[in-house]
Image (cartoon, rainbow, N blue to C red):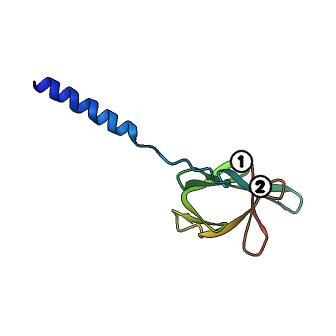
């Protein structure tokens, strides 16, 4: 009897855990966004800094900064959307939280700051 009750309990737990579903997020910001800046010192050496924001569907993401293709900094962030404005809240105090807007009419799609300047472009 004990074995039968244990078996039914296990089957019940498995059945209940399979009934839960995760709501799918189809927000247009999902994916990889990047910004690249190059600078040269007296025309001798060129330094390239690339920043990437990877937005996933559970309102989390990863920010990464590269210098000459070498990863120099990364942190996680949370993001949310409110009337077309996307708030990015970083997990590291070295990076300032920011709010951006998505401009889908442009090709490629861009994230812009409040003043209209380009923050990042879609990869």
**Rendering coords of residue 27 (x, y %):** 63, 54
Q: Which mark is residue 69?
A: 1
Quarter assignment of residue 72: bottom right
- Image point (10%, 24%), residue name: 1
Q: Nearer the viewer, residue 120 or 92?
A: 120
Q: Nearer the viewer, residue 7 or 79?
A: 7
Q: Are marks 2 and 1 in contact (CB under 8 Å)?
A: yes
- Image point (59%, 69%), residue name: 97
Task: Residue under label 2, please give it.
Answer: 48
- Residue that extends furthest to the left in the rendered view of this protein: 1
Q: Secondary structure at mark 2?
A: strand
**Rendering coords of residue 2 (x, y %):** 11, 26
- Image point (55%, 47%), residue name: 24
**Rendering coords of residue 22 (x, y %):** 47, 46
Label 2 or label 1, whichever comes before in sequence order: 2
Q: Secondary structure at mark 1?
A: loop
**Rendering coords of residue 86 (x, y %):** 63, 65
- Image point (82%, 53%), residue name: 108
Q: Nearer the viewer, residue 14 or 114?
A: 14
**Within 10 angstroms of label 1, few (less than 14), some, or many (20 or more) residues?**
few
- Residue that extends furthest to the bottom in the rendered view of this protein: 115
Q: Is residue 66 left or right of residue 6?
A: right
- Per the model, the C-alpha gap separating discs 2 and 1 is 8 Å
Q: Is residue 96 left or right of residue 46?
A: left
Q: Is residue 39 left or right of residue 87?
A: right
Quarter assignment of residue 109: bottom right
């Amino acid at each position: 009897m004990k074995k039968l009750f244990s078996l039914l309990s296990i089957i019940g737990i498995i059945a209940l855990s399979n009934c839960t579903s995760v709501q799918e997020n189809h927000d247009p910001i999902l994916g990889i966004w990047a910004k690249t800046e190059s600078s040269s010192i007296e025309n001798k050496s060129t330094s390239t800094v690339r920043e990437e924001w990877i937005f996933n569907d559970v309102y989390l993401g990863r920010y990464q900064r590269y210098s000459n293709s070498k990863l120099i900094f990364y942190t996680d962030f949370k993001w949310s959307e409110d009337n077309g404005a996307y708030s990015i809240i970083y997990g590291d105090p070295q990076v300032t939280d920011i709010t951006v807007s998505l401009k889908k009419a442009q090709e490629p799609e861009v994230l812009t700051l409040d003043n209209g300047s380009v923050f990042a472009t879609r990869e």
